[in-house]
Image (tube, grey):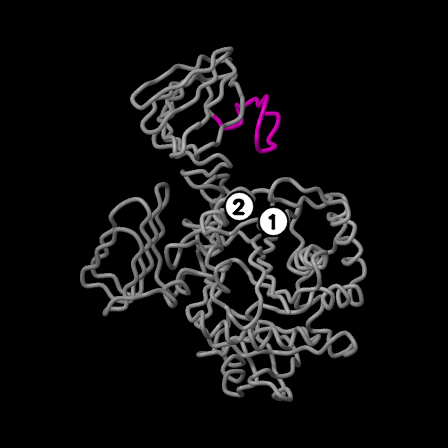
Amino acid sequence: MTIKSVILSGGSGTRLWPASRESYPKQLLPLTGAHSMLQETALRLQGFVATEVDRRPIIVTNEDYRFIIAEQLRQIGTSSPQIVLEPVGRNTAPALTLAAHVAAGEGDPVLLVMPADHVIVDVEAFQRGIAEGAALADAGALVTFGIVPDRPETGYGYIRAGDLQEGAVSARGLLEFVEKPDAATAECYVASGEYFWNSGIFMMKASVWLRAIRHFNPALADACAAAISGCQADADFLRVDRAAFEKCPSDSIDYAVMEKLASAPELGRGVVVPLSAGWSDVGAWDALWAVSEKDAEGNSARGEVMFEASRNTLVHASDRLVAAIGCEDMVVVETPDAVMVAHKSRTQDVKKVVARLKAEGKTLTQSHRKVYRPWGWYDSIDNGERFQVKRIVVNPGAKLSLQMHHHRAEHWIVVRGTAEVTCGEKVFLLAENESTYIPLGHRHRLANPGRLPLEIIEVQSGGYLGEDDIVRFEDNYGRTGQ
């Protein structure tokens, strides 16, 4: 038996604004440790010895996150990941179906399906649950993991489980999925001992899933099969056929298959494995506080933070020192371009702020001041009328597109590393403390020929400084046009 991870990484995580943005959502952020949530998910089977693990995960995501995900996986030593790009979002069932087709081409592994944006505190307990689930899945079961509730919770869906399965350690029969309850119903669920939180984590063989999805939703199965048959490989990425996938109906794994298994037992039995491993979907800032390390007063800090006479408070600082004085049950999140302050009991209302910002046409919900690109990143550190200043870092061996601007000129000053500059017909090198001028309308390119990151300061001047004033002539990353 071989286990292969399938990581679903398409969500935007707007309830963790302002740290999470549409172009850089929560799964790409290091919220609980040194690694991002995506990296933690990819590392979750590290050291797993119960059976063979395929070290090349399948990541299902979209075009916007593809280069960031590839770079984050490279940073943790993941070689040859299979990154499947969805041209449009269609929920979790189509995403898993695409991944199952990819996996089925390499045998018939047991798939461990995990969202990229969940926290697991007790990895050993998680791996024990996975070992039990893998044995059941290898025997043909469709397994879901139910989180053992430690409180009545109205923010999660629940799974009702039946009797202990014959010969199982803890696995129980899957009876039904139920929607998020009200408070009184949640209390009854927890008191009964029959209900578990729905984790969104699943295990089954690739062939078992493909057979089940074809039985219950043939239109979805046909659209995904056509999308995969027309896919194209592009470096680490598999681009599925857009026209075929756009015809795919949207559905979740729960609704598409899992809750219907009782009506078709010949497709495989539904099983719930209880899991008590410090799980959280980190749906809001108060949930992050609950799973974070805390001091003796219950305070949790990330970044440069000082607490004074404060209790049970979360401070997330990314750019500056934040001093919290006399705060109790508060959340403070600081980024270079926005600060959010809320009582822990009101963190779900962050989505209301995000909605207002979108209605007002502000870009603060879409991207950070620091913007990641396939070649590295830039940070817009200052701007004013007819000028903008950026700090640009180019990864070793990377290069920007050959481009020109209609409305701006640029000055480049090398702070660290060596830059290869193309300006018109000239190609030359710049060392630290050297600079050059790119006139308006000139074709130009910046590249890093060295082994260390290249850092420059760019000063733009002109009548229009928007990012859409770029005409690309050549690009290593498939970006073309304006």
Quarter in which the C terminus is drawn: top right
What SS does tag 1 mark?
strand
Residue 344 part of the magenta segment: no
Left or right: residue 337 compared with residue 13 = left
Q: Any magenta on residue 469? A: yes
Which residue is drawn at the image coordinates 44% and 12% (left, top)?
Answer: 439
* Pointer 1 or 2: first along the chain: 2
Task: State which quarter of the image contains the N terminus.
Answer: bottom right
Q: Write the start and end of the magenta stretch as one range.
A: 466-482
Q: Residue at x 76, y 45 (%)?
A: 230
Q: Is residue 55 above or below residue 338?
A: below
Residue 70: numbered disc:
2
Secondary element type, mark 2: helix
Q: Amino acid at mark 1?
A: Ile
Q: Which mark is residue 83?
A: 1
Spatial separation of the CA atoms under disc 1 and disc 2:
8 Å
Q: Give the residue drawn at x 64%, y 49%.
A: 84
For badge 2, the amino acid type reads Ala
Label number found at residue 175: none
